[in-house]
Image: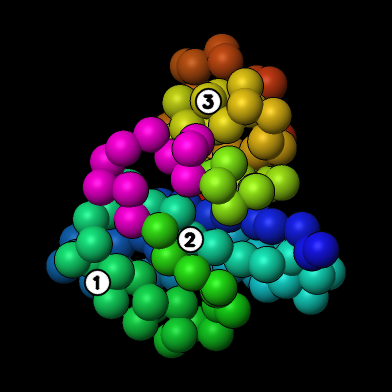
Amino acid sequence: MSKVLTVDFDYTLASSDVEGSLLPVEPVINFVKGKHLDGYQLHVVTFRSLKDKKEVKDFCKDYDIPIESIVCTDSQNKVPFLKELESSLHIDDNAEVCLLASLAGIEVLLVDWGQNIHNKNTKMFNKIRAS
């Protein structure tokens, strides 16, 4: 059975410019593609709603991100979804999501945009710089 990597979408795989266009977060995309080459199955788990699923799917297709599925939680806690997918590693820019996933026994990688500079709790997480 292969390992499972779950990854957030907004400000993890994609950021946006002032016009709202989606832009790739290259360090995360490259990391995720490398994990796929190492045998990981990739799943996007996002707070977005189901109506946004096509936009996420199109973005992943445009940037050749080999995902197995997209889970839209509609702003619900991601941890039950991560556990159902049997995630062994989750990547997210949200420190609270990382904390909850970590407490559930899932390894996490926090996407660092400098957004948590004053949050002492984020020191416990391994990080990947967004830029």
Q: Residue 71 in the image: state x and y as whole percent.
A: 40, 58
Q: Looking at the image, which is closer to me, 81 or 94?
A: 81
Q: Quadrant of the C terminus?
A: bottom right
Q: Which residue is mark 3?
A: 100
Element marked by disc 3: helix
What is the magenta range? 72-81
Hey, what amino acid is under mark 2? Val
Q: How far apart, in angstroms, are the residues tagged by discs 3 and 1? A: 30 Å
Three-letter amino acid code at the position of disc 1: Ser
Marks 3 and 1 close (CB-CB < 8 Å): no
x and y, in percent, of residue 51 in the image = 18, 66
Q: Residue shown at 58%/52% (left/top)?
A: 85
As helix, strand or loop, the secondary structure at mark 1 comes to loop
| Furthest residue toward top | 120
Q: Are marks 2 and 1 in contact (CB under 8 Å)?
A: no
Rate crowding at label 1 as few (under 14), some (14 to 19) or many (20 or more) other CA atoms within 10 Å.
Answer: few
* Residue that label 1 marks: 21
* Residue on which the image places disc 2: 44
Are there few (<14), some (14-19), or many (20+) residues within 10 Å of tag 2? many
Q: Sequence-wise, which precedes: disc 2 or disc 1?
A: 1
CA–CA distance in space, label 2 to label 1: 19 Å
